[in-house]
Image: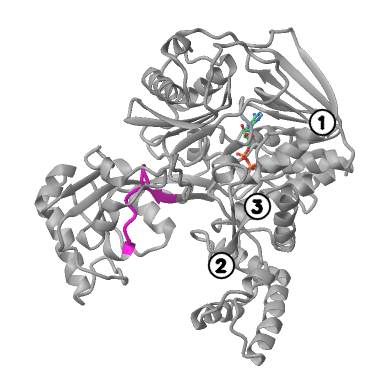
């Protein structure tokens, strides 16, 4: 099966993997051909595509992708149905009230995938049985508990376990891996040994010099600039041409790229530890491609790409730690949803919550509680509460995050006295549902529902997203023509589907004239014609009415294509305030004893804008620090 995992363009995605404290469920006696299979079902908003992983006899993972369901309303279906299917090993599960059509779409897509994997119709009709018994109350004790089994959580868990502590990881889903598993696949670190093999262009050197010319905001920034300047002076004296990088440049670019909102003391650690974190993952079995590249929005070629030996997308950033942790006897309790940090005398002493079958639990800890529950990109209410910079982040704005990213740890942490920082910094990116229509921006325009152009298409990502949100129904059409259409029509989208097959599926339309295309997408032909005419005049040298500067060809070569696109919430930069030891700080800036946090649940690292490829370096680095600090009972 051909699979391409280049960009995380799906809107909702959940990858389920059975793990945890419960015993095995019973289900039909499947005989599968082990592998990953794809299936489609019709949901409320369109096609839902799911990928299902099976071994010889069991459904072991479910990946759900849907970008057309209504965020918020469909979330419970995405959260519950895959979990129930894995738990009962059966697709004869109940639909979720209020999201019936989405539920059916999910179930039908999994069915189709399972049929391809070798299941029979009879097996698919069989009802499964849930495992586990409901008991009055579960009480567990350990030294360190970690709330959230994503990349930060398992980095912390393995570190604490290897430091000699008893550890329990809990996760509210039946799956482990969190949003990390759905992440785009790159991790940034200055790695001069590899980067020396590449060349640096004069314009790249000029970019470094621009950063050196900035007036320093604080002593950290001054020091980073001085370190880089010393290196660059020597570089020039040697007449070197290799690609320069250093931890100081990584820190400076992250600080600058995040509009100086980050805490520089955290960036100091971040930049110094990123390569170590990659090497640590390598010792756990993660593999990498040979080349260093620049992830979208990374601002410098220092992105390390995994070779996917642990599976697609971000699996490589969480499964290596999880595997070692489990091999060493670390415990994971899935379907344990935490709702409260237990506090005694100002100290965090455990966590309480409820399991999926409704049993309340408490886990008491003697050393520490680590919050690693991820961001809040999928929590519409929280997005709306904290948003200051976007026209709206209501339920019409989709997210690239999985449905678990609901900010639970932020709410629990705040209730335990934590300070929150940078909550208003929410990152959006523009995307298209199938990811298949990615013509060069040089030769494309954005038009809205009516057919009007509304933004210079060569602008920053946040400018594009902001402008899209202000359009009717918050979407746009990405329009291109025959200069790139051949490529489009012969290409495959990021899932490996042939793009030609997506035409006229309500997301991608092709026509021989601009007028015909306008009619197909329901735009006003006169407005659409004017949008194209203005652009074409600008390609010819006239000033662009929207100030665009990058051009290649006129839009004048049939066929013409329009692809549906939208802005989506991608990352939440704010969260729990932590210090260099990952201790959670209270509103007076003092550590809350026994309480630690790492990963997207924290704030202060990415500032106002996260650079592409920095999130994974963050969760690995600070996850390990949180694990060490908790094990030491700091
Ligand atoms: P990070 O990238 O910071 O590691 P992820 O999103 O990858 O964050 O992982 C966070 C994990 O936390 C997810 O697996 C999610 O299911 C889990 N989680 C979120 N809220 C809770 C909660 N209330 N109780 C238990 N687990 C939770």
Q: Which residue is mark 1?
A: 329
Who comes first in sequence, dot 3 or dot 1?
A: 3
Q: Quadrant of residue 147?
A: top right
Q: Distance between the Cα atoms at labels 1 and 2?
A: 38 Å
- Inspect this view and state whether residue 266 appears: no
Q: Quadrant of residue 240?
A: bottom right
Q: Residue at x 27, y 65 (%)?
A: 546
Q: Distance between the Cα atoms at labels 3 and 1?
A: 24 Å
Image-based side of 62 in relation to 630, left or right: left
Q: Residue 486 in magenta?
A: no
In the image, which residues are magenta?
429-441
Q: Residues within 10 Å of mark 3 (few under 14, many from 20)?
A: some
Q: Nearer the viewer, residue 120 or 318?
A: 120
Q: Residue at x 90, y 39 (%)?
A: 164
Q: Nearer the viewer, residue 223 or 111?
A: 111
Q: Which mark is residue 301?
A: 2
Q: Position of residue 90 (x, y in %)?
A: 52, 14
**Is label 3 or label 1 in front?**
3
Whether 403 is drawn above or below 3: the answer is above
Q: Nearer the viewer, residue 405 or 240?
A: 240
Q: Secondary structure at mark 1?
A: loop
Q: Which residue is mark 3?
A: 287
Who comes first in sequence, dot 1 or dot 2?
A: 2
Q: Which mark is residue 485?
A: none
Q: Secondary structure at mark 3?
A: loop
- Mark 2 and mark 1 in contact (Cβ < 8 Å)? no
Who comes first in sequence, dot 3 or dot 2?
A: 3
Q: Position of residue 74 (x, y in %)?
A: 43, 26
Image quadrant occupied by the C terminus: top right
Image-based side of 36 in relation to 407, left or right: left
């Amino acid at each position: 099966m051909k699979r391409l995992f280049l960009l995380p363009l799906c809107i909702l995605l959940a990858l389920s993997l059975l793990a945890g404290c419960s015993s095995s469920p019973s289900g039909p006696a499947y005989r599968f051909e082990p592998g990953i299979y794809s299936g489609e079902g019709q949901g409320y908003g369109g096609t839902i595509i799911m990928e299902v992983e099976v071994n010889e006899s069991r459904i072991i993972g479910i990946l759900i992708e849907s970008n057309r369901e209504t965020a918020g309303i469909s979330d419970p279906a995405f959260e519950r149905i895959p979990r129930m299917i894995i738990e009962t090993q059966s697709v004869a599960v109940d639909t979720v009230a209020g999201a019936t059509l989405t539920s059916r779409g999910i179930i039908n897509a999994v069915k189709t995938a399972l049929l391809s994997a070798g299941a029979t119709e009879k097996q698919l009709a069989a009802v499964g049985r849930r495992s586990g018994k409901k008991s009055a109350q579960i009480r567990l004790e350990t030294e360190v508990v970690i709330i959230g089994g994503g990349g930060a959580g398992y980095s912390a868990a393995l570190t604490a376990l290897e430091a000699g502590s008893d550890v329990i990881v809990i996760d509210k889903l039946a799956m482990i891996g969190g949003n990390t598993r759905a992440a785009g696949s790159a991790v940034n670190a200055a790695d001069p040994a590899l980067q020396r093999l590449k060349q640096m262009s004069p314009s790249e050197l000029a970019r470094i010099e621009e950063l050196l010319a900035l007036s320093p905001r604080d002593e950290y920034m001054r020091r980073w600039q001085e370190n880089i300047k010393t290196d660059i002076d020597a570089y020039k004296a040697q007449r070197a041409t290799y690609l320069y990088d250093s931890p100081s440049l990584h820190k400076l670019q992250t600080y600058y790229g995040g509009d100086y909102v980050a805490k520089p003391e955290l960036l100091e650690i971040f930049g110094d530890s990123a390569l170590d974190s990659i090497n640590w993952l390598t010792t756990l079995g993660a593999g990498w491609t040979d080349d260093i590249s620049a992830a979208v929005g990374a601002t410098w070629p220092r992105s390390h790409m995994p070779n996917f030996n642990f599976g697609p997308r971000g699996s490589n950033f969480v499964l290596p730690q999880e595997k070692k942790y489990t091999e060493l006897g670390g415990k994971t309790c899935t379907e344990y949803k935490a709702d409260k940090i237990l506090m005694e005398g100002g100290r965090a002493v455990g966590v309480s919550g409820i399991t999926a079958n409704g049993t309340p639990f408490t886990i008491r800890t003697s050393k520490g509680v680590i919050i690693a529950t991820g961001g809040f990109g999928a929590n519409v209410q929280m997005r709306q509460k904290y948003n200051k910079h976007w026209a709206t982040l209501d339920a019409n704005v989709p997210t690239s995050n999985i449905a678990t990213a609901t900010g639970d740890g932020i709410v629990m942490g705040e209730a335990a006295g934590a300070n929150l920082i940078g909550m208003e910094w929410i990152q959006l990116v523009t995307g298209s549902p199938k990811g298949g229509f990615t013509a060069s921006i040089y030769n494309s325009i954005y038009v809205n529902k009516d057919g009007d152009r509304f933004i210079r298409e060569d602008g920053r990502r946040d400018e594009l997203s902001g402008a899209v949100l202000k359009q009717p129904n918050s979407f746009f059409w990405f329009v291109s023509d025959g200069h790139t259409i051949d490529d489009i029509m012969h290409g495959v989208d990021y899932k490996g589907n042939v793009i030609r097959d997506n035409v006229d599926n309500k997301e991608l339309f092709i026509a021989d004239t601009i007028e015909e295309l306008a009619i197909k997408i329901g735009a006003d032909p006169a407005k659409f014609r004017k949008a194209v005419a203005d652009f074409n005049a600008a390609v010819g040298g006239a000033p662009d009415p929207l100030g665009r500067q990058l051009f290649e060809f006129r839009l004048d070569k049939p066929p013409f294509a329009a692809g549906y696109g939208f802005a989506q919430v991608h990352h939440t930069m704010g969260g729990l305030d932590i210090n260099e030891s990952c201790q959670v700080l209270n509103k007076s800036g003092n550590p809350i004893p026994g309480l630690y946090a790492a990963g997207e649940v924290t704030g202060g690292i990415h500032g106002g804008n996260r650079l592409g490829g920095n999130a994974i370096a963050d969760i690995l680095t600070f996850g390990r620090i949180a694990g060490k600090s908790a094990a030491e009972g700091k």
